[in-house]
Amino acid sequence: MARITIEDCLKRVDNRFKLVNAAARRVRQIREGSEYLVVSPKNEDIVVALREIAAGRVLVQQEAAEPDEVEAVEKENDTSD
């Protein structure tokens, strides 16, 4: 099977940080007994997770910032004092 690249995965996920997070979550699922979503004989779990993401078999949700987090950032950036 062809080598997986970060660029292949970034076609499905909009930034590297979300990609790392999604891959780590998928590895945990695999290690807890979840079946592979792509054919990938004798590969490390992380390679399988990245192949699944690149193939579009894993849906990575785009999360919105929590309201408290947004508010905290706004307070930190407020320079009107």
Image (spheres, helix red, strand yellow):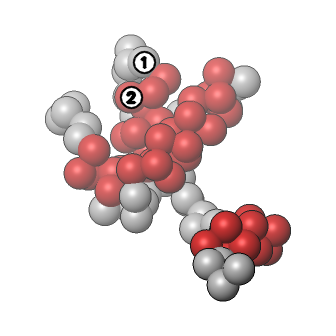
Q: Which residue is mark 2?
A: 47
Name the one closer to the observer, 4 or 34: 4
Tell me which residue sits at (61%, 73%) in the image: 77
Name the one closer to the observer, 73 or 28: 73
Tell me which residue sits at (81%, 68%) in the image: 68
Q: Relative to residue 9, is residue 32 depicted above or below? A: above
The amino acid at mark 2 is Val
Left-right relation of 47 to 26: left
Q: Secondary structure at mark 2?
A: helix
Q: Which residue is mark 1?
A: 44
Mark 1 → mark 2, Cα distance in angstroms: 5 Å
Q: Relative to residue 60, is residue 64 depicted above or below? A: below
Name the one closer to the observer, 77 or 2: 77
The amino acid at mark 1 is Glu
Q: Relative to residue 19, is residue 78 depicted above or below? A: below
Tell me which residue sits at (65%, 78%) in the image: 78
